[in-house]
Structures are given as C-alpha cells and as structure tokens.
Amino acid sequence: MSVRLSKTHVDKALKDVAAGARAYDLIDSQQPGLLLRVGPRGARWAFKAIRAKTTLRLTIGSPPEISLDEARTIAAAAQRGIVNRLWAPDDRFLEAELVKLGKVAPRPAPPPRDPAMIADWERHTEDLPYWTWEQARTEYLTEVKRTKRPDTHKDYSAKLHMKELAGLAGRKVRRITLEDLAKVVYEVHKSGRETQAFNLASALRPMWRWLWLAHVRSSAGFSVEDRIGADISKLQAPDKTPGLKPRANGKVPGKHVATPTELGTILAVARCGLLDPTVSLALELLVTTVQRRRPIADAQAADFVPWVEMPGWGVWSMGPRHRKTADKRDDQTRHVLPLPPSLWARLAPQVQRSQGAGTPFMFPQVRPWRLGEQADGHMSDSAINHRLLDLGLRASPHDVRRGFSTHGRRILGIARSDTKLIMDHAEGIPTDDVLEAHYTADDRLDLKQPVMARWVAWCDEQAAAAAAGLPPLDQLATEIATRRRIREKEGQAKTAAKRKAAEEKAAAEAAEEDKRILYAAVLAAA
C-alpha cells in the first residue's frame, strides 16, 4: 500500500508490533523506494529499487532509533547514487549515511603506513622478475659446464655450494653486495680454511663478471650503472697467516721434491700387478710424462695415437679443454708429448681396451664417486693422491713434477727451456708472442723426443733399482692395504669430528636463541 507516510503511521506501526498484528508493508509515496515493514518481530525501514531487471535492497534501521525524516534522507541518497551510478546501496553506504546523521561513531582513522614497510614492499615488487641466488648459481654453472673443462665445472660447483653461502638463499643477486660476499669469504678464512677462502673468492669473481655481461644482466637485474660486475674484482681473501704450515705428514707445501727412490718406487709398484690396471697406468703416466693429475685422470683415449714417423713411439696430444694453463689463457693449441717405445707398449693396449668398452676416457671410472651414481666417467684425480699415500710415500703429483724439473736438470742436464716444453708451462713461449699466437702450428716433437727418451730411460733405471728392494708381493699387498685402511679410518674420524662440532655449534646457537626469546617474553610480560 502506497501512502504519504507520517508520524501517525509510524506510531501505529509500533503499536501493531506490540499487539502482535499480522505483517504488512507501507510504501512511502513521497520518497520513492522507502518502505516501512511491520511484523511480529518489529518494524524497520527498508529501501527497494529495481534497475536493469535487478532488485536492490537495503535495510536501513528501525523506528524510533531512525526517524521518518532520517529514513527519507538515507533513501533519497540511495536513490541518487543509483540514478547517477555513483554508489550501490550496501552496508558501506549505509554506515557512511548513519555517520553523517550522527547515529554511529566514525571508524578511527587507520594508522599511517610505515615508510620502511612501504619501501620493502616496493623493492620486493621491483625485484620479482629477477634471479635469486639459487637461480643465478644454476644458470652460471650451466654456462661453466658448457664452456669450461669438466673439472672446472666440478670445482666451481663445490665452491658455490659451500655451507657458508647458505645465508644468500632466496636473496636476489642484484641485492647481494660486494660487502656481503667479502663477509662470507672472511668467515671461511677466519675458520682456518685460508686456502678455501682464496678459492671461494676465485669462484665468485668470475660468476659476478658473467652476471654483469650485457646478455645476462637483464635477467640478473643489474645495470651498467650498478658496476657490481666491475667492482667484484676487488673481492679478495684476507692475507694468509705468515709462515709455512707443515702438513700432517711433515711436508711443507711447495717445497718437497720427489726423490729418485720415490719415483722408482711408484713405477715399480705400478708395474708389479698389485694395483688396479687403470690406476697403475695412471701412476706410470704421472711419473713418465710429469703432467698434472687432472689431465691424466680425464685423459681421452682418442688423444693417444701412434707416431707414424717414428715406429714404436706414441703421441699424447692434449687439447686445451683438459689443460689448466691453456684453459686459463684461452689457448687453443694442443700440448703434444712423444711417448718412448717402452712406455707406448704399455699404453697402446689400454687405448684399445677403452675404445672397445665404448668409453672416451683413457682411464675409466672404477666405481661410482657417490652412492647412487653410475660409473660412466673417468677416474677421480684424487685416486692418484690416495694411491701415493697408500704406498707410504711423501711425494704428491706436484712433487713428482718438481722431481722432473730438479733431477732432469741436475742429473740429466736437461735445459730449463726443454723442461718447460715437457711440463706445459706455455712450452717456454711468452704469452704475448705474436708469432706463436697467430702463425706457428709446430708441436716441437723434434725437441721433445730426446728429452722424453732420456727421462723415461732414467725413470726405468730407478724403477728397476726400486723393484729389487721391494718386499715379497703378498707382504707388499698387506702393507698397502693396511695403510689404506688406516687412511680411510682417519678420514672417517675427521669427518665424524667435523660433523659433531657442527652439531654442537648448532645446538649452542639454538640454546642461545631460546634464551633470547625467553628473555624477550619476560620483558614483555613485565
């Protein structure tokens, strides 16, 4: 029923509610959309409008809290908002109108936003498209694997996964500063691992230079102005502790020279048949060619070929990808060594075995490096060091190289320039030699052949002398096995001690954190 509502209608509606009258609606003819709904549960003002086949409803309130004039004011505002498409008649609209009429208190103003939180949020939003530390590391190691030696990828992967770098997890690389990296390197150095600190810095520097390259920096979030790629060259490990630190076996690093007896013993044991044939040949190649352990461990079978011009001789042609110095200098030449007949006679069958087995490596992997992996790679370069320790020798692979440079010059009269030809120290040619860099493709086999012949013959003499002094094979096998078990037990003990120390440190840090939280809770309660 449509009537021009008045105070009389409102009073009667309230009496009908008290009497429990039947429900009815009164439509106000003065204000379109305003209704007074009356029923047993009370009287209330309502607003109703139909727009575009949609019914819009709003409960305004009940008299006498909301008077007729106030109800008309709210209904008129709702009608005006609908017609002008300014707002919808909802709870938010009703609250605003009641605040205007003084019926409800306005909500308290929200506290001002923390500028620091706003800045953090803006920085977070800005950083979203760019690489995190983990993503950047994965992309960089993928590039290293594609462009560098396999062992370089292995080394960089180990260094960039050091536990000290865990604090960078989840951070965007564009927010990692030179100071952040320097702090990590310093923590490693302070723990006593000075060489590892130096190596870690040497792995982080090329990574950040790569991230700063023009085709990469857009993904890393760097710009030319950031200069982080240039400034990272300043990342250095702290100076090493003064003085030389003797190792556990009493050796001073970089000072020991493999003696003729040690060189002969290595060859004598390698040739007596006690060791695995793969390891034996690797040890023999170490002494006779005096190359670094890694080029030997991952030597390619295809790089060993007969020397056609010299019957009975062989040739080992090492590519730059498998040579430390060439890889660093971006040298694309090959280091070629002639192999005397006595040596080539033992290496040639191994070449055939490797090719027949379908492996590209001269010395295939004997067993997986880690549990769950497959033995489809080359032997570990550490195996060479371990076998030398099992023989009870102090000499390391580098000590063997020093033995060649020392004994070759003093005993055999090999010139220093000829020594460099064999040891692959740029083969004695300055790195800025224009003729060598652009025009010469000579392997210098004519110069290397007499040097290798004299050296291998001298080594054979030392091997024969050492073989005469070896104990019976069964006794020698027992001694080697005993040293190996002792070495492995000592290694396991060191690993267990490190693990225990790390667990104790973590437990102490957790206890300190618990104390801090408890202390903070006590202060808050006080």
Image (tube, rainbow, N blue to C red):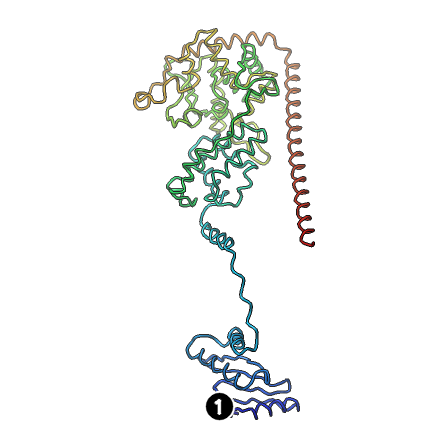
Which residue appears at 30% of the width and 24% of the height?
Answer: 438
Residue 248, quarter of the rendered image: top right
Quadrant where the C terminus is found in the figure = bottom right
In this rendered view, identify the residue nearer to me: 456 or 83. Answer: 83
Mark 1 sits on what residue?
29
Picture layout, residue 404 above or below residue 189: above
Residue 302, quarter of the rendered image: top left
Which residue appears at 58% of the width and 90% of the height?
Answer: 10
In this rendered view, identify the residue nearer to me: 404 or 366. Answer: 404
Which residue appears at 61% of the width and 87% of the height?
Answer: 39
Find the residue positioned furthest to the front: 526
Picture layout, residue 208 above or below residue 91: above
Residue 187 in the image, given as x and y percentages of width and height: 56, 34
Count every numbered label the image shows and give the total: 1
Could you tell me which secondary element the residue under label 1 belongs to? loop
Residue 408 in the image, given as x and y percentages of width and height: 46, 10
Please name the amino acid that badge 1 sits on.
Answer: Ser
Picture layout, residue 189 above or below residue 481: below
Residue 310 in the image, given as x and y percentages of width and height: 39, 13
Q: Is residue 139 left or right of residue 370?
A: left
Residue 451, quarter of the rendered image: top left
In this rendered view, identify the residue nearer to me: 89 or 424. Answer: 89
In this rendered view, identify the residue nearer to me: 324 or 195. Answer: 195
Picture layout, residue 98 above or below residue 433: below
Residue 266 in the image, given as x and y percentages of width and height: 56, 15
Q: Residues within 10 Å of mark 1 (few under 14, many from 20)?
A: some
